[in-house]
Amino acid sequence: MVARRTNPYAKVYSYGANGSAVRAGSPIASQHTIHSHPRARARKRLEVRAPLWVIVLVVAAAVFFQAFAMLGMQSGITGEQKHINTLTRELAKVQESIDSLEVSIAQASDPSRIHSIAVNRLGMRQPTPEQIHLLPRPEAPYKADESARPQEGGGVLRMLLSLVGL
């Protein structure tokens, strides 16, 4: 610790409200050494200064790892773009096959085409009046009776069950 001995007195001027100046003096240093606060001494001891080459090396390593991280992200993005392009091509192929199948369905369900295939390929003809036999309509398998009507307070489920015959 250093003792200050530049001047025996500090020059202090005090200015009053009326503009007057007064000079006062007090000794600024004594023969005793000046001790700083204990926490300030502890902070000074903990202060570590790294050499310049260590700082440059740490910054270079940080830049190096950041560059590789960015390259890794960019390669991942490129791979995903290739995957998207592949899926887009597959989707186009599937859409083409869907379109061709829709055309085939439309052609297959055309009544005039079905008629021409039946007559030309299969040799089918319109039946003659002698070949047509009319059969009487069969009786209904059940008769409507009072149980088929919905009963009071039975609800919708009972009405549906009675319509079905249960």
Image (cartoon, helix red, strand yellow):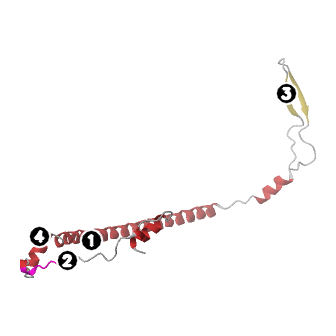
Q: CA distance from mark 2 to mark 4?
A: 32 Å
Tell me if 85 is positioned left or right of 47 in this view: left
Q: Of callouts 1 and 3, which one flags the residue occurring earlier in the amino acid sequence?
A: 3
Residue topped by disc 2: 136
Q: Of callouts 1 and 2, which one flags the residue occurring earlier in the amino acid sequence?
A: 1
Q: Residues within 10 Å of mark 1 (few under 14, many from 20)?
A: few
Report the magenta stretch's main SS. Answer: loop
Tell me the tag on residue 79: none
Q: Nearer the viewer, residue 119 or 80?
A: 119
Q: Of callouts 4 and 3, which one flags the residue occurring earlier in the amino acid sequence?
A: 3
- Indicate the amino acid at tag 1: Lys
Query: Which stretch did the figure color magenta?
Result: 130-136
- Indicate the amino acid at tag 2: Pro
Measuring from the top left, give residue 40's x and y in whole percent.
82, 52
Residue topped by disc 3: 13
Q: CA distance from mark 1 to mark 4?
A: 31 Å
Residues at circles 2 and 4 in contact by the CB criterion of under 8 Å:
no
Q: CA distance from mark 1 to mark 2?
A: 55 Å
